[in-house]
Image (cartoon, rainbow, N blue to C red):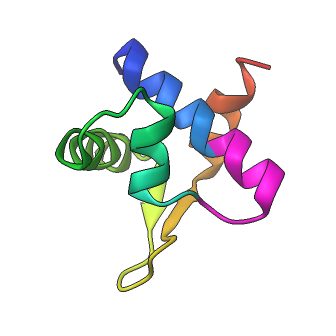
């Protein structure tokens, strides 16, 4: 996992803790210094492939942290 992927995972975790639901890809891009949606899509895919998140099909706020992702994101706190 790259440092930017880790930072994105932590952001997603903190967002879910604060709001009770996951951020959209646009919200993640804005939080990550206006990265493109394509870049965020790749990062999300890499996190999914690593087993750190799951995605609900056909949902706008579709990111769910796995137990593994939750534990890793908590390391930064």
**Residue drawn at (59%, 44%) of the image:** 12
**Residue drawn at (36%, 50%) of the image:** 48
Quadrant assignment, res 14: top right
**Residue drawn at (42%, 47%) of the image:** 51
**Left or right: 5 with respect to 14?**
left
Report the number of numbered marks: 0
Task: Please give the range of residues in magenta.
Answer: 13-22
Q: Nearer the viewer, residue 42 or 71?
A: 42
- Indicate the quadrant containing the N terminus: top left, top right, bottom left or bottom right: top left
Q: Nearer the viewer, residue 39 or 50?
A: 39
Residue 20, x across and y down, in percent: 78, 64
Most frequent secondary structure within the magenta stretch: helix
Is residue 49 in sight in this rendering? yes
**Left or right: 60 with respect to 35?**
right
In the rendered image of this protein, does residue 5 appear above or below residue 25? above
- Indicate the quadrant containing the C terminus: top left, top right, bottom left or bottom right: top right
Residue 72, x across and y down, in percent: 62, 29
**Residue drawn at (40%, 55%) of the image:** 25
In the rendered image of this protein, does residue 14 appear above or below residue 66? above
Quadrant assignment, res 50: top left
Q: Nearer the viewer, residue 39 or 64?
A: 39
In the rendered image of this protein, does residue 16 appear above or below residue 75? below
Q: Is residue 54 magenta?
A: no
């Amino acid at each position: 996992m790259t440092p930017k992927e880790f930072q994105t995972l932590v952001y997603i975790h903190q967002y879910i803790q604060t709001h009770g639901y996951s951020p959209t890809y646009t919200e993640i891009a804005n939080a990550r210094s206006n990265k493109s949606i394509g870049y965020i899509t790749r990062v999300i895919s890499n996190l999914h492939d690593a087993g750190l998140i799951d995605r609900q099909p056909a949902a706008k706020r579709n990111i769910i942290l796995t137990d593994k992702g939750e534990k890793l994101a908590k390391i930064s706190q």
